[in-house]
Each structure stands twice: as C-alpha cells, then as structure tokens.
Amino acid sequence: MALIQVQSVSRNVATSDGELQILSELSFSIDRGEVVAVVGASGSGKSTLLSLLAGLDLPSTGQVVIDNVNLNDLDEEQRAILRGDKIGFIFQSFLLIQSLTALENVMLPAELAGRPNPEQEARELLAKVGLSERLTHYPNQLSGGEQQRVAIARAFIGQPQILFADEPTGNLDSKTGERVEALLFELNREFNTTLVVVTHDDKLAQRCDRTLRLDAGQLVEQQHVA
Amino acid sequence: MWPKISWRLLKHELRRGELTIMAAAVALAVCAVLSLSVFSERLQLGLLDRSSEFLAADRVLRARGAEIPTEWLERADQDNVAWTQRVTFNSMAFAHGEMTLVDVKSVGDGYPLRGHLEVASAPYTEGERVENLPQAGETWVQGSLFQTLNLEIGSVLEIGDAEFTVTQVLSHQPDAGFNVFTDSPTVLIHIDELDRTGLIQPGSRVNYNYLFAGEPSDIQRFETWLVPQLDDVTQRWTSIQDGDSPLSAALNRAERFMLLASLLGVVLAATAVAVAAQRYAQRNFDAVAIMKTLGGRTPQITRIFTLHLLLLTVVSILLGLLLGNALQYGVIWWVSDQLGYALPSGGSGPYVLAIATGLLCALMFSLYPLLRLLKIPPLRVLRREITAQGLGKWLHWLIAGATIFLLMVIYSGSLMLSSALFAGGLVAMLLLLGIGRLFIRASRSAGMQAGSSWRLAMAGLQRRAAQNSMQMLSFSIAIMLLLLVLALRNELLDDWQSQLPDDAPNYFVVNVAPHQVQPMQDMFEAESIQATELYPIVPGRLVAINGTMVRDAVTKEERDDSEFREGFGRELQLTWQANLPAENRILQGQWFSPGEAGVSVESQVAERINVGVGDELTFRVAADEFTVPVTSIREVDWNTMQPNFYMVFSPDLLEGMPATYIASFHLPTERRAELYRLFRDFPQASLIDVEDILTQIRDVIGHVSLAITFVMVLVIFAGALVLVAQVQASLDERRQELVILRTLGARSSLLSRAVSYEFVVLGALAGLIATIAMEVAVYALQTQVFNMQPTFHWRFWVLGPTIGAFVVAALGWAVCYRLLQHHTGTLIRRLQ
C-alpha cells in the first residue's frame, strides 16, 4: 500500500529571466516500509523534490499525498503537525541546534510533540547510536560522524513513519560515512520506517530497494534493486 | 514543555557567551538609567539642600511692612511643612559711646531650617557649629561690629529701648546674603526679644520673612495652595532656583547637561540593544527552521522565543539593577567622601524608570528581529539562503523610532525637548547616511592605488556600501555623542573654573576714607595681598532721563525687585574710573576719551530703564544736580567677586564729592587670623567676609562637576558597547567572505590587515563625520541651551577621526583575529 503518492507534481520558480521549471510532471508512489534512493546530478531537482515530499514547500501543480492526506489541503501549521507526527529528517550538514547539547537536540522533537518521556527516549536512542558518553556535549564539541549520529537519533525519536535523509553521508569521510550509513539502515529496519534517501553516492543507492533517477527535473528512471 | 526549551536555550547561550552583547546592552541601559537617575536625584536633593542653605529654608515668603495671615501658617502646619520667622530691619546700635548702623535679625525657634549657624569666641577665628539661638537678653554679632564699636565678649549693646549682652561672635549664617554696599553687620536676637526694642512701629521699614522647609511633595502642595493668594507688590515667594542665587545659572546648566547626557546615554544603550537584537535573531534563524521542520508549530515556537527573550530581558535587567545599584552606591560613597557630607537618599522612582527602560529597550528593539525570526520558513533547512519574507524594513524603523522617542519622553519628561532632539537627530541621521555613502564611494578610487590588503579592504567597503553606510552611521552616532559629551563637559567646567578661580577675592573692604586709600594700597603691597584697585563710591540718585523726572517710572518698574535689589531704585552707588574695569565689556558706544564727560551704564539696567547711548541722565548727589550723556553700555560679569557698578562716570565729574572707597582682595584662609592686625590702622573701614559664600558655591560646583564626569563615563561605556556590537554584527557579514578567502589560501596576516584597513577607513570616516556633526551640535547647544559663548574645538578634528580609526579597527582586528584562530575546516563547518 502506498504511503507516499506523488501525482503530476511540478515546481516552478520565478527568476529575473522568467519562470524556471525545477520539477516537471513527476508521478510515483512509495510503499510503507520501502527504502528509496533519489539520485541525480547537482541541480536535477533532488532537494526540491525532498522539500515537497516533506511538506516544507508546496508544488506549483499536482499533489503529494502522505498517508492519505493531501498536503495541498493543509496549511503551514497543519503540515508542521504532520511532520511532527510522521516524519523524521537527516541532513547533510546535520542541522543540530548549536546551543543545545546532544541529549537536548535529540529530545527536541519529542518535546515539541508533547510526548511523555523525552529524556528517557533520547538517552536510549543515543545509547543505540553509541553516544552515551557524549550526552552533554555541544555540537561543536563533536566530530562530523558523531554529529550525524546525534541527528539520526533525533530523527528516530518520534518513531516516524517516514524518514527523509538528504545526503546523510555527504559531509563525512568514506569510513565514517559507511558507519553512519550502516547505523541508519539498522535503525530503519528496527523501527520499520519508510526511508527516502537523497544521495550522490551510488553505493548507498545500491543498498536501497528502489532508485528514482532525476534529470533536469524529470523522472528518467525507476530501478528496482535486487 | 516549551518553557523548558526556552530556559535551556537561554542557559546554554548565556554560558557560551552568545548573548553577551545583547545582555550587556540591556544591562547597561538599565544600569545607566538607574545609576544616573538615582545619582542625579540624590545629587539634586543634595544640591537643593546645600543651595537651600542660602535661603536657610526650602522656600521663603518675603513680606514687606506687614505680617501674613496666621491661617497661612496653620495651613503650613497641616501640610507638614515646618516654618519659622525671620524679621529684619536696619537700626542704630550703641556701645561704649559709639554708634553704627546694624542689620537687626530676629529669628524664631528652628532657625535656620536649612544650613546651620556657627559662632566663635573672638572675631575672625574659626567658628563652631551651634544648634541653639541667643537666649533672652543675649545677642550674637558679626566680627566687623567688634571692630567698629570696640566690642568684647560680654559688652552691652543697645538697640532701640533694649540692652543685650554680646555672648558670641556670629561667624557663619547660611542666609547671610551678600551686598557689599548695604551690608551692615548682623546683630542676631531671638524673635521674642523684638517687642522689647520698641522699634517695630506702624510704618517702620521691616521685612517679615517666613521660612518653610519640608518634604518636596509637602512643600509643593503648600506652594500650590499659597502662591495664588499672594499680592505681587509686597509679598514674594522665593526658592533657590528662582535665579536670585549666584548658583542658579550653574545649577540650571548642570541640570540641562545631565538630562541631555543621560538621554544620549540611554539612546546609545538602546542602539546597542537594537544592533545586538538583530544579531540575536540572525543567529536563531537556523534553530527556528529546524524546529519547524521537526514539527514545531508557529505558536509553540513563538512562545519559546518570546519566553527566551523575556528571560534574557529579566536576567539582563536584574544584572543591570545590581550593577547600577553597586555603581551608584560606590559613586555616592566616593562623592560624599569628597564633599564631606552624606547625600540624602532618594525614592523608588529611578528603579521603576530603569526597569521600564530595560523592558522597552529589549522588547521593542527585539520585536522586529523576533517577527522576522518567526517568519523563517522551514525550507531554510534545505535552502540556506532563505530568510524571512514579507516584513518591510519600514516596520523596523517605525518601531525603533517610536521606542527611542518614547524613551526620550519618559526619561526627560518633556515632550518639547524630546520632539526637538528627535527631529534634529532624524535630520542628522539622514545627512550622515548620505555623507557616509559619498565618502565610501570616494574612498574606492583612493584604495585602488594601494597595496593588496588595502585593495581588498577598499573593494570590501565598496561592495558593502549599503551595509557599510548603516554601520558608519552607528559608528558616527556613537563617536559623535561621545565627543559631544566630552566637549560640553570641558566647556562647562572651564566656564565655571574661570568664574571662580582659587584666588578669587574672599573679602571686601568698604567705607575706606579718601586719605586712607594710599596707606591701604601700600599695606596690600607690603603684605603681598592680591587686591582689586580701590573704587570710589558716591551715593546718588537718578532723577531724570532726557529731562523727564523718573521717580514714578522707576519705582513702578522697580516695584517687583526694589525690595530685593538693594541699592537701586532708591539710591545708587556711583563711581568714576579712567579705565574700563576688568570683567566689563563695552556693548555699545565707547569708553571715555580723556576730558570727555559722560556715564557708562550697565546693560541690564540700561534695558530696564530704557536708556541708550546719547540719552541724557540727570543725577542728584548730596544737594547738587548734574546732567551727563550716556556714552557707553557695559556688560558686567556679576559672578566675579569684585566690586561692580551700575553707573560708572568719567573722572573729574564726581571728584570733590564726599566719597568712600571699596576694594576686594584675596587672603588665603590660613592667614585669616592676621585680619585684625592688618586692618587695625583703618578703624572706619569695614570688612565683609565672603569666604563662606565662595566655599558654598565651590561645593555646589564640585558636586556638579563630579556628576557630569560620572555621566560622561557612562556615556562612554554605552558608546563603546554600540561600537563592539556593531563590529561584531558587521563581522558576521564578512565571515563568509573571510572563510572563502582563507580557503583560497589567503594568509591570516593579509586577512586581518584587510579587515583592519577596512575598519580603519570606516572608523576614520565615521570619526570625521562625527566631528563635523559634534561641532554643529555643540554650537547649537552652547548658543540655544546653555547660554554660553560658542567655541571651536580644533583638537577634536584630530581626535575624532583618530579615535574612530583606532578603536573601530582595533575592535575589528580583535574579532577577526579570534575568527582566524580556527582551522579552515572548522570555519567552513560553522558557515554551514
């Protein structure tokens, strides 16, 4: 059953030279529990697609339906609630809040959602990603790999149905990248999350169930792996 | 949950120093307002207390010829206002077969209500403070009377029908007043003894003075009730600020300066808050975007950041109150130590004012940045260039302008002053902005011919012309206000200092007979005493102007003041001089040429009796009448302690008429005991001691000087904070560029030089613009507000640009240096 449905989605932006189409007429769906990689060259529209799937932005035409809810029908606030309920994020540049410790960064989504025991949950997750000793460290006191592990723990705290990862290993050296990647897939299996990974990394794409390839804003290939 | 998040953010950010500038700016605003208002309130009370001593009360009701209705005094009792009576009149006093004119002063219990009396056991010796008054049958008299009537302690003095035993020398009375021509020695008796003299008869020339003192609010209430009932002819209500006191000009100027400087301090601190708040919002753009992405709803995030800001404000206000309190205690302790007495304590008003200022500054200046912050879309997590949309800059300027105006009104309590300053400031700001842009444009071509650091600096300046002219505006404003306060302070202090140098005359000698003039001059010279020349005095009357009798006209004109400006309106002290006396300035006409007959008239008198050069004045001296033309109008500096005259005649005109002579001289305090010996050979001459008055004036001026220095230091702090905040903020904008240049291999020395040069140019230009603006502002203030001669400050033309260049560049370099200490990798990571 499709958890994410993308129907004829286009995204245009106004520039000084006129309207520029970033995505054109995309249609596909992603099933619950599926792991999908979105690949393509720089400027192919991967990040824009991610922003539309996560409800951070709305399509110019077409619609994105998540768990039977059409995002076009929701306002900014309702989309935020939906993200809080169903969606987790991992970013290339980690995007941790610099003035909060590792533990507090992980607790934040649970606190915003008003969950009962954020600290306990956060501690357990940080233990899972191997950072029990780093709870009170600030982001700038952590290495890149450690920061991304904190971000992974934060992404899973809400037990989201969908996890969007934007180049999760893009800022890490290959060894650390592999470790982070392994952790991401492991947790994904454990929580049975639907994972959408935007990546340049073919090896990472190979580990996914399916690959969506974008070129100049168009979906050029859907390839099922294994 | 959200309060926890707010608190957590605040706690960590405070600990990590991210909010330091913002907290410091709010704390400084609070600290400045609190310490300034507490200090100036206490100082004001102290000043009034000290100045009230000149009146011996807070207010005096002077009534000529008759007592006031007793219900007025009952009303004073009801209003909690203390009162006592002082009745004064002139009379002859007799002792040892000699007689002389004395000023009889009979006072009621409680006198003096402000200040104190001092008595001594021998004339011209150090007095001791006393709390009581002469008993029945006793009198205390001034030292000069001992000389004139050959008195000793225990001598009997006859006044009218009564006899009094002289029991003390009256060495200090707070309300001694000072008029060298009419001052007869004071004879102090208790008011209950007045009837016994039999001198108070219907029609006697008696002054009934009622002295009042109490809490300001009580006095105010009583004053509001009483004043409308006074008849303006024989009754006059006086307070120390009414301009009668030699201090009122100094006090008024000081008050204006304090108000102005404090306002500038508050505006500067508010500017620092505004700059810091902008930066605060920018730093939190990512946090808001992340929270929104993670499911945070706008109301939730609004609550988190509003509380965050409120907590920050509260912490900063508390810090400011703590600092302000400590500061004002420290300063007051130091000032009291300097002045030798404690300043009275003030009310809670300043605390309310300080808290209100802190809240207003922090909340209003953060409002626009906060609104922008909350408008950050979640999409920023993917597209970092996105900032808030849909909020016009005009809103920011509107809120900031309204807040500054509100602060000015609250602080000054005057809509007029605030509107004028605000409008002036607005015009100045627009001009500065325009000039700044022009300068930056011009500097580009200059920079192109220089080395690589300079080229980089100039290119940077040009590229960021818009932001730079805003930064330059705040640098200019900060530097200008600093220079302004510094220049004004120096002007005021110099002005006061020149009026009362340390060797200002502290004694007057009057009634010197013509044959004693030479011996006295010889004595002054032999004893190395600095003295003015001896001026002849001939008493006379002005009887006609251009042939019209003036008695009626003059008395009508003079009605209000005649009672209180002894010596004019009835009888004038006329003198003659071949040369223009020192401290006198000719406004119209010419000083006498040899052989010319004429009179030179003091400018205020000329205005009052409406005469000018060429008018003919007729005087009567003894039985002679003569008419002379007015040949010049003179301005006289009445603040100098030397004999000054309304009418100065050309030599020859008055010669041969019965004259006595007057001079003033300076005798160091430690030589006071020699007075008796020095003047033993001049028994008819009387000495008037003005040392007391001088000390009082110096005291007050000392107060005021300290106060304005203190204000200046606070303004400097506020200005420095604006500079730091602005440099920090502008370096944030440069950070990305610096990191890129660094990545491309630019050495730190090149980069820090480029940044320093850029700031050198910015600072120097700001300093130059600030100096121009300061010169204009000082001119306007000197001529319009402080009634001073305008001056030009050439030193500041060097100082302004130098300070600007040096301070701004040093701050820029320091911030840049810290940035460049990190590895390039770390810097790049931070940028993201």
Image: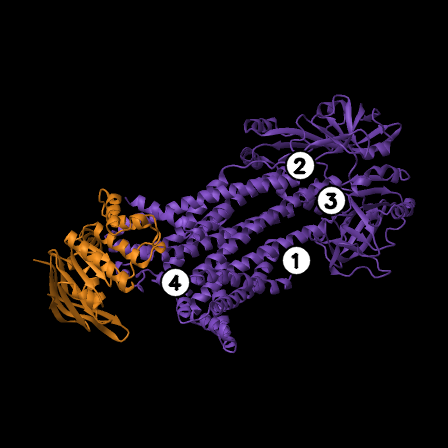
Chain colours: A orange, B purple
- Cα separation between marks 3 and 2: 28 Å
Residue named by callout 3: B569
Q: Nearer the viewer, residue B23 or B239?
A: B23
Q: Which residue is mark 2?
A: B53
Where's the C terminus of chain B, which quadrant?
bottom left
User: Label 2: chain?
Assistant: B
Name the residue beneath numbered marker 1: B789
Q: Are marks 1 and 2 on the same chain?
A: yes
At label 3, the amino acid type is: Gly
Q: Secondary structure at mark 4?
A: helix
Mark toward the start of the polypeptide (1 vs 4): 1
Amino acid type, callout 1: Gln
SS of the residue under disc 2: helix
In the displayed image of the protein, which residue is found farthest to the top?
B136
Kindly check if marks 3 and 2 are in contact, taking CB atoms under 8 A apart as contact: no
Residue extending furthest toward the bottom: B449
Q: Nearer the viewer, mark 3 or mark 4?
A: 4
Mark drawn on residue A66: none
Examine the rendered structure and indicate whether residue B370 appears above or below residue A210: above
Question: Which corner quadrant of the image does residue B233 belong to?
Answer: top right
Residue B614 visible? The answer is: yes
Q: Residues within 10 Å of mark 2 (few under 14, many from 20)?
A: many
Residue bearing the label numbered 4: B827
